[in-house]
Amino acid sequence: MTRSRPRPSPEGDPFDEVPFTAVPLETAGWPGLPDRRRRLLGLDVDDLTLEEAALRVVELARERRRAWVAFVNAHCFNVARRDASYLEALRGASLVLPDGVGVRLAARLFRPGLRDNPNGTDLFPHLCRFARERGLSMALVGGQAGVAEATAGRSRAAWPGLEIVATLPGEFSADGTRRILETLRHRSPDLLLVAGGVPLQEQWIASHLAEIPAGVTLAVGGLFDFYSGRLPRAPRVVRRCGLEWSWRLLHEPRRLAARYLLGNPAFLGWIARVRLHLASALPEAEPMLPPPPVSSPRSVPSGSPRATGDGPAPPNARSPRNPA
């Protein structure tokens, strides 16, 4: 059985849900869903399906765990290689979800491949539907002027009854942060979506997580641009072919040319060199991301297998045979 879309929508409409097999929310919980963490290029990522990711985020929000979720694509790995504070922020996230064809290709190269592509743009419609069904509130922070408001308006129209309690501009200066936190303290959303771009949004969330009165906070990048209607989402056939990056480049060439035309080859070259050195058992001339300090484990909501140390070991933990 598959979930139906909230309303008929044309190919390429971001509100057109990517379907998945339904699982009753009552049976889904943080410890109830399997822990599928694996290490990829020195960063622990959560190898979840879109369905599992949606259910896990909803459960975190319902239980007010004050967790946060990051999404990582090839560009994020490139930034993490040169920005230690961004890498540290990622390692403190409760969930790190893989996003895009580049990361999937890297996982396939180091085996096993990822099971799905639970990116934030595909995840958002399911979160909206689950939030409405479970009575969870949502707040949107970031994006260009008016974009968060437009996203909220279109989301409410797609899911009548969805409670979006705040829409705030992406002013992440000291004064802007004070205003954002003050508003959030009065509204106390269950789900908070922050769109500030990589690495600002992740660093902002990591720095202020203890002050953010939300059940779960998600770093969502350019998501509001699609759901506000400011930019068109690639048709599903383009996304299935792994070419959404080319669609985005076509629509924002000035902003994204360096990221995709220079960054994508740099990422592919890096993972190829890492794979070559690992296969030949030579010392790593092209190191993976540096290992985290022993005293700084990933920040995980209390009560989860990762927080207590009682859960299963990551299936692909770093070892001489599987170091990627």
Image: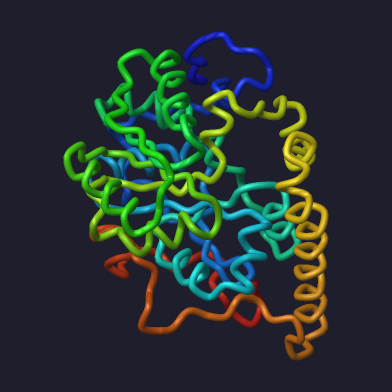
Going by the picture, which residue comes out furthest to the top? 8
Going by the picture, which residue comes out furthest to the left? 186
Relative to 1, is 71 above or below? Answer: below
- Does residue 8 appear left or right of residue 101 in this picture? left
The one nearer the camera, 97 or 281, is 97
Residue at 27% over, 30% down: 165
Q: Quadrant of residue 190?
A: top left
Relative to 88, is 293 above or below? Answer: below
Going by the picture, which residue comes out furthest to the front? 175
Relative to 129, is 4 above or below? Answer: above
Q: Quadrant of residue 252?
A: top right
Residue 146, percent from left and from top:
46, 30
Residue at 32% over, 39% down: 191
Quadrant into which the C terminus falls? bottom right
Residue 256, percent from left and from top:
73, 48
Residue 21, percent from left and from top:
50, 27
Residue 60, percent from left and from top:
30, 45
Q: How many marks?
A: 0
Residue at 46% over, 49% down: 219
Say how the picture is coloured.
rainbow
The one nearer the camera, 87 or 198, is 198
